[in-house]
Image (tube, helix red, strand yellow):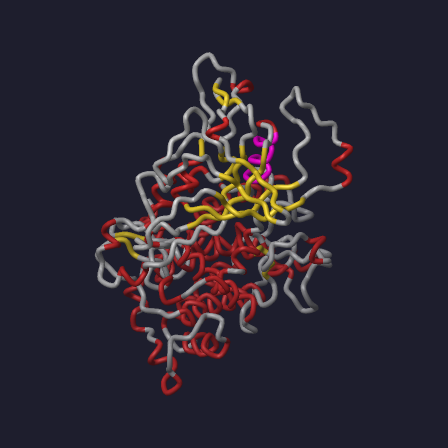
């Protein structure tokens, strides 16, 4: 808390921002419908958090019995107290502390996660005009915030009797919140430093209908962010020193998944080298129809498999996931080892499919397919009619390799595969998954282990499964119906179960692992 003596604010200097297009003059404004022509500008300013809270009336939409919703003039949603509490904790301690429970906050080193809780996004308010009425009350002149133009400077003159954060209006608050009410409610019963300020965008005399429209346009209409593009930004946003500590949190897991996907896309040994839609573009945007699973879909599948959290209850979790129980982690593998493991698994499966002469693979190779990435690609693995190039197929592969290795991890000696042995004299700091040389070392190392031998066995057995999609030309009605079960969200579970059943018919070690994985899921 600042020790600076508070000076009572009487005026706020504002920047006048003009936003008006000539085309808007053609709009039919209607005062009777509370859609009168608004001013051609708004104001940008800053205000102390406590002052803004005192001057603001948050008129929340209600659901009172007998009051038609269409006739409720208030814009704001109801107050979600938990949300405001989280924001308050964020302001005090930053992220991720604001979302941590008491147990995590009390762990050794947790204080290193404390961060500033900046609120740089503007609170949007409306300044009531003289004569304005709210909830059957007309604002008296003593409660008004006056807008004064002094040459190039605009000042917002506060009520004469305004005396800070404890001020109360005689009847009506002079400012009303259009967007940002939960940020303001976060300061309820919380008095930050007296010089803690918030950015404000202030409209003047904006009709209620326009306020509702503005609230809707800010919160509802913006297109949902492209998830693949968002994940692509993670490396620019993260600070590994605290994300790596906060191992149970989804941001940690998503960040790790993004790193792994980037490695699959960028490493020459990967069967998905440059064959992942990293930015979530449509075929038209990419300029081709090459079948590629998006980065976002890959990340969701990794989150549901290898980077899934697990506990002591017996159910399968992710080999790279954080534990929720007495164990710290299942495997001491760094990121290069994780990426190398998955690239080795994918390459082993690709090699087995290429060598496969089963009917399903031969028929796909005979199909006319002009969507391959490059000459020499196997249509059975990379073609448009292969399940392997679909979201469901990727999820199925990841599920199988994760679940089987998880189920017999002790038999495979997963904990015995160590970076110190892999890197030898080259070991240094733990490398990122995207470090090509480090990932290559991990891939080459697996070829000499029983882990690698088991993965190759799994790959060969998976190659004998029928990976054709239901849209493959020439399927019989029975075959098409059989493959159609993999469509939609239910297809993930169905494909995994069919692959498990298929692998139970394989060699003894493989059948044992498949049975164990199946039992752990039940």
Q: Residue drawn at (62%, 24%), measured in percent from left and top? A: 34
- Residue 199 visible in the snapshot: yes
Q: Residue drawn at (54%, 69%), measured in percent from left and top? A: 270
**In the depicted structure, whether residue 343 falls above or below residue 297:** below
Measured from the top left, where is residue 9 in percent x and y?
43, 44
Measured from the top left, where is residue 152 in percent x and y?
63, 49
SS majority, magenta: helix
Q: Residue drawn at (46%, 35%), measured in percent from left and top? A: 159
User: Does residue 213 belong to the magenta stretch?
Assistant: yes
User: Does residue 149 belong to the magenta stretch?
Assistant: no
Q: Quadrant of the C terminus?
A: top left
Q: Which residues are magenta?
A: 210-219
**Total labels drawn:** 0
- Residue 518 visible in the snapshot: no
In terms of image quadrants, where is residue 318?
bottom left
In front here: 78 or 252? 78
Measured from the top left, where is residue 169 in percent x and y?
41, 29
**In the depicted structure, whether residue 472 falls above or below residue 107:** above
In front here: 466 or 155? 155
In terms of image quadrants, where is residue 190?
top left
Measured from the top left, where is residue 110 in percent x and y?
27, 60
In terms of image quadrants, where is residue 96?
bottom left
**In the depicted structure, whether residue 420 falls above or below residue 79:** below
Q: Is residue 510 left or right of residue 277?
A: left
């Amino acid at each position: 808390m600042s020790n600076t003596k508070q000076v009572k604010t009487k005026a706020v200097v504002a920047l006048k921002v003009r936003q008006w297009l000539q085309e808007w003059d053609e709009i039919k404004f209607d005062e009777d419908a509370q859609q009168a022509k608004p001013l051609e500008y708004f104001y940008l300013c800053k205000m102390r958090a406590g002052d803004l809270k005192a001057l603001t009336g948050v008129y929340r939409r209600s659901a009172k019995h007998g009051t038609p919703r269409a006739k409720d003039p208030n814009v704001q949603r109801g107050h979600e107290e938990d949300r405001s509490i989280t924001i308050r904790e964020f302001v005090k301690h930053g992220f991720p502390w604001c979302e941590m429970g008491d147990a995590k906050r009390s762990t050794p080193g947790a204080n290193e996660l404390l961060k500033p809780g900046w609120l740089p996004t503007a609170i949007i308010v409306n300044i009531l005009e003289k004569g304005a009425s709210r909830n059957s009350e007309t604002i008296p002149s003593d409660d008004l915030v006056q807008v004064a133009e002094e040459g190039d400077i605009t000042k917002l003159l506060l009520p004469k009797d305004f005396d800070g954060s404890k001020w109360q209006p005689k009847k009506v608050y002079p400012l009303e919140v259009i967007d940002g009410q939960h940020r303001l409610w976060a300061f309820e019963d919380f008095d930050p430093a007296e010089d803690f300020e918030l950015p404000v965008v202030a409209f003047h005399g904006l009709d209620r209908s326009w306020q509702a429209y503005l609230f809707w346009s800010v919160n509802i209409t913006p297109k949902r962010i492209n998830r693949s593009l968002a994940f692509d930004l993670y490396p620019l946003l993260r600070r590994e020193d605290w994300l790596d500590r906060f191992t149970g949190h989804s941001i940690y897991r998503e960040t790790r998944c993004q790193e792994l996907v980037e490695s699959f896309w960028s490493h020459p040994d990967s069967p998905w080298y440059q064959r992942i839609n990293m930015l979530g573009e449509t075929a038209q945007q990419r300029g081709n129809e090459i079948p590629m699973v998006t980065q976002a879909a890959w990340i969701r599948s990794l989150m549901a498999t290898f980077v899934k959290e697990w506990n002591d209850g017996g159910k399968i979790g992710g080999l790279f996931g954080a534990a929720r129980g007495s164990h710290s982690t299942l495997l001491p593998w760094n990121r290069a080892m994780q990426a190398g493991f998955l690239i080795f698994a994918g390459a082993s499966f690709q090699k087995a499919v290429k060598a496969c002469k089963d009917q399903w693979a031969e028929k796909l190779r005979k199909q006319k397919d002009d969507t391959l990435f490059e000459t020499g690609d196997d249509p059975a693995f990379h073609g448009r009619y292969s399940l392997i190039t679909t979201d469901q197929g990727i999820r199925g592969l990841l599920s199988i390799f994760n679940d089987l290795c998880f189920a017999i991890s002790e038999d495979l000696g997963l904990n015995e595969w160590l970076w110190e042995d892999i890197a030898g004299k080259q070991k240094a700091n733990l490398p990122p998954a995207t470090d090509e040389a480090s990932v290559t070392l991990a891939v080459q190392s697996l070829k000499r282990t029983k882990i690698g031998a088991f993965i190759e066995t799994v790959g060969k057995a998976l190659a004998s499964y029928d990976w054709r999609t239901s849209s493959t030309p020439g399927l019989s009605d029975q075959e098409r119906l059989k493959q159609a079960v993999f469509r939609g969200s239910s297809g993930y579970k169905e494909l995994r179960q069919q692959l498990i059943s298929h692998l139970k018919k394989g060699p003894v070690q493989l059948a044992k692992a498949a049975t164990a994985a199946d039992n752990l899921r039940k």
